Image (cartoon, grey):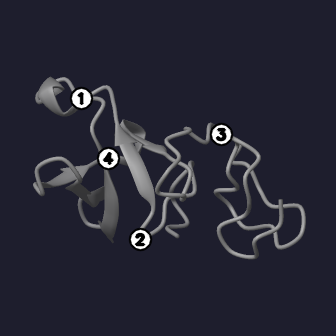
Amino acid sequence: MHAGSDNMLREGARVKVHSLVRAPEHNGKQGKAGSFDASTGRWSVLIESDGRSLALKPANLTLLCSRADCSVALMPPPLRCAKCKAVAYCSKGVECWLCGVL
């Protein structure tokens, strides 16, 4: 997780791209966060649909539920598991990605 990120992004997190002005064709696409480049303030994001890698600002990414079968956006403040306090608790009420608590 990158400490400077308001939406609790971390490497491997599922994200949705939004509000891009120069490349609006990528808005709405989902991907996986790679590494954070502190020198540019951008996350490397691997887009699921085409395998393309984009360098995006945290402001253009929405954290998604970590379950592969769920596309629910976790809006700030992030949802947390009541037991282990992990971020990215499924907002569909399924289970925590870390400890499995409902």
Residue at disc 1, secondary structure: loop
Give x and y (percent) for residue 79: 73, 49
Cα distance, mark 3 to mark 4? 16 Å
Query: Is residue 46 visible in the rendered structure shown here?
Result: yes
Q: Which residue is mark 3?
A: 76
Task: Choose the circle earlier in sequence order: 3 or 4.
Answer: 4
Q: Is residue 79 above or below residue 39?
A: above
Task: Choose the circle earlier in sequence order: 2 or 3.
Answer: 2
Identify the residue shown where x is 12% and y is 57%.
51
Q: Is residue 61 above or below residue 84?
A: above
Residue at disc 4, secondary structure: loop
Cα distance, mark 2 to mark 4? 14 Å
Q: Amino acid at mark 2?
A: Glu
Q: Which residue is mark 2?
A: 11
* Count of numbered tags: 4
Q: Amino acid at mark 3?
A: Pro
Cα distance, mark 2 to mark 1? 21 Å
Residue 46 is left or right of residue 3, and the answer is left
Q: Nearer the viewer, residue 59 or 52?
A: 52
Q: Are marks 2 and 1 in contact (CB under 8 Å)?
A: no
Task: Choose the circle earlier in sequence order: 3 or 1.
Answer: 1
Image mark for residue 57: 4
Cα distance, mark 3 to mark 1? 19 Å
Mark 3 closeness class: few <14, some 14–19, many ≥20 residues within 10 Å: few
Task: Choose the circle earlier in sequence order: 2 or 1.
Answer: 2
Identify the residue shown where x is 54% and y is 58%.
67
Task: Choose the circle earlier in sequence order: 2 or 4.
Answer: 2
Closer to viewer: mark 3 or mark 4: 3
Give x and y (percent) for residue 85: 80, 67
